[in-house]
Amino acid sequence: MVFWIEDLQSKRILIDGKHTKEKALRIYNQLQELEPSTSLQATKKLAFNANEGWLTGFIKRHAFHNVKIKEEVASADENAAKTIPDKLAKIVEEGYTPEQIFNADETGLFWKKMLERTYIAKSEKSAGGFKAAKDRVTFLL
C-alpha cells in the first residue's frame, strides 16, 4: 500500500481515503486467492475490513498526512483575446447585417471532479505541481 501511494504521488495522481480503502481490499482479496485453503484456515479466517479505523491507523503507522491541494490560478490567453475583436469585425463586415448579429456567451461544464485533498509522506511539506482536470464540455448560449 505504501509503495502504491508513493507511486501515485510520483505520477502526480491524487488519492483519497475512499480509493486507499478500495485498493487495500483488492490487495487483501488477491492475497486470499493466492493462499491455499485448508479446513483449519477456513474456520479461523477473519475478514479484513478496510474501514475508517483501519485507514487512520495505516496513515499514522506509515507517517502520511492529508493535505489540501492548492489549485493553480486560471489564466486567460491574453494574446488570443486581443486578436478576437479584429477577427470578429472582419467576419461581420464580410456579409452579416445588423439583424443577424446576436449576443452570445459561453460556459463550461466540468464533468470530472478532481479531489481536493491527497495523502503525502509526513516529510513532504506540500503536494505541489498538481493541475485540476480540464475535462469539460463548453456550451455557447
Image: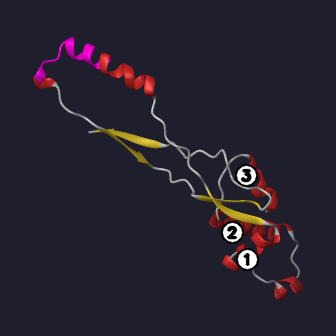
Please determine whether, in this image, residue 128 is positioned above or below residue 23. Answer: above
Query: Residues in magenta?
Result: 87-98
26 with respect to 16 (left or right): right
Going 32% across and 17% down the picture, which residue do you hit? 87
Residue at 46%, 29% (x, y): give it.
77
* Residue that appears at 71% across and 73% down: 55
Q: Is residue 120 magenta?
A: no
Instruction: Give the numbered dot on residue 21.
Output: 2
Circle 3 residue: 9
**Which amino acid does the dot numbered 2 rest on?**
Lys
Q: Residue furthest left?
A: 99
**Disc 1/disc 2 C-alpha distance (Å):** 8 Å
Residue furthest bottom in the image: 43
Please state which of residues 64 and 4 is positioned toward the viewer in this rendering.
64
Q: Are marks 3 and 2 in contact (CB under 8 Å)?
A: no
Above/below status of 27 relative to 74: below
Whether residues under marks 1 and 2 lie with C-beta atoms below 8 angstroms apart, the answer is: yes
> Residue at horizontal 67%, vertical 50%?
13
State the image coordinates of residue 47 (x, y, percent, origin top left). Answer: 75, 81
Q: Secondary structure at mark 3?
A: helix
Label 2's element? helix
* Element assignment for label 1: helix
Q: Amino acid at mark 3?
A: Gln
Task: Give the main secondary structure of the magenta stretch.
Answer: helix
Quickly name the residue at label 1. Answer: 54
Q: Residues within 10 Å of mark 1 (few under 14, many from 20)?
A: some
Query: Crowding at label 2, few (<14), some or many (≥20) Cα neighbours within 10 Å?
Result: some
